[in-house]
Image (tube, helix red, strand yellow):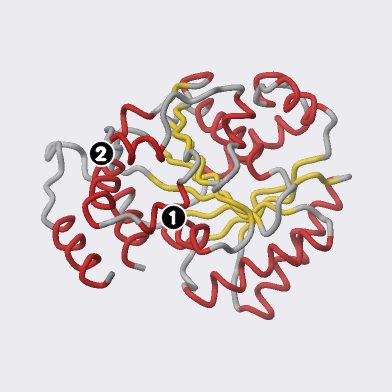
Amino acid sequence: MLDQANGLREKMKNQQPENPGRKAGKKTRVLAVTSGKGGVGKSNFALNFALSLIEQNKKVLIFDVDLGFANIEVLLGLMPRETIATMIEKDLAVQDIIEEGPNGLLFISGGNGFNELFQMNDLKLEKFFKELGTLQGKVDYIILDTGAGLSYENLRFILAADDVILVTTPEPTSITDAYSVVKMVQGIDPNVHLKLVVNQCISEKEGQQTADNFKQATEQFLGKEIGSLGCIPSDARVPEAVKRQQPLLLAYPNSESATAIRQMASGFLQLPLPYKLGLKGFIMKILFK
C-alpha cells in the first residue's frame, strides 16, 4: 500500500493543469456534511443547502458517499443511470456519471459497492482520482453527503474536506455522538474546519442553547473551537417534502426550515475562507492522510 501511495503521489505531482490560463484563485471547495448518528436530517440538509448555494449563484455538485444508502437520489426522486461503482466497473469518465437535478444541481451517486473504493488496485484508484480532479474549477462547491458515524471511509472524507458541517439535534444521544465525531477528528487533525448545525429544534432558544453548550464543551474539554451556522426548526413540511421526493426548498420554499437553511447558506458564504488547495488538495489528502 505504501508503494502504491508513493507512486500515485509522484504521478499526481507531475500532472499539469488542463488550462494553465485559468485564474489561480478559481478553486473548487470540498464541503463534507456529516453527523454522529442517523436520523438527524443530514442528507436533507446537504441537499437543500446545496440548492441554497445555487440560489446564491454558485455552481454546486452533490456527491452521495453515504455507503449503502442512496439518500440523495431518493430525496430527489431520481434513478441515476450510472454511479461511482459502475464508473469503476465500466471504466467511464466522471462526466458520464454526473446527473443534473433541479435548478442546475449536479449529482453523483456512490452506488452499491462504493465501499470498495479504498481497496481498489493502483490503476483503478489512479483513474478514479484523476477523473475526479477534472472537476477542479468547473464547480464552486462539491458537497459530500457522508454516512453517519465514524466509519473508516467517513473519516477519510471528513479529514480531507476543506470544510465540515456537523449536523445534530438537541436530543442527548445525537449530541453525544456528534461530540464523539469532534473528539476523533480533533485527535487526528486539529486543523479541520468544523461548523455546527442544530436541526429539528422546538424553538430558536432551544437550538441556540444546544449550540452554545456543545461549543463550550468542545472548547473546554477538547480545545476545539467550533463555529455555528445556526438552527433549523422542526417543520411538518420536511417529511411532506420527503414523501413527495422533492427538495424542501422547491416543494415548500417559504417554510420555516427552508428559510433557515437559506440564511445558513448566506452566512456561510460570508465567512472568511482560509486558503485551500481545492479539489486537488482534497484528492492528495484522501489518498495519503
Q: Amino acid at mark 1?
A: Ala
Front-most of residues 232 and 62: 62
The foreground one among 12 and 195 is 12
Q: CA distance from mark 1 to mark 2?
A: 17 Å
The residue singled out by tag 2 in the image is 134
Q: In the figure, is residue 225 to the left or right of 29?
A: right
Residue 88, percent from left and from top: 33, 41
Return the x and y of residue 231 as percentages of the image width and height: 74, 46
Asked which secondary structure carries label 1, the reply is loop
The x and y percentages for residue 6 are: 20, 68
Q: Residue at x 75, y 33 (%)?
A: 257
- Number of labels in the image equals 2
Measured along the vertical axis of the image, is residue 124 above or below residue 136?
A: below
Pointers 1 and 2 in contact (CB under 8 A)?
A: no
Q: Residues within 10 Å of mark 2 (few under 14, many from 20)?
A: some
Q: Is residue 80 left or right of residue 266?
A: left
In the picture, which quadrant includes the N terminus?
bottom left
Residue farthest to the bottom, as pictured: 221
Q: Position of residue 234 (x, y in %)?
A: 83, 39
- Mark 1 or mark 2: which comes first in sequence? 2
Q: Which residue is mark 1?
A: 161
Look at the image and tell me in which quarter the C terminus lies.
bottom left
| Residue at the (79%, 54%) spot, across then down | 208
Asked whether 52 or 151 is in front, the reply is 151
Element on which disc 2 rests: loop
Given the image, on which type of amino acid does mark 2 rest? Answer: Thr
Rate crowding at label 1 as few (under 14), some (14 to 19) or many (20 or more) other CA atoms within 10 Å. Answer: many
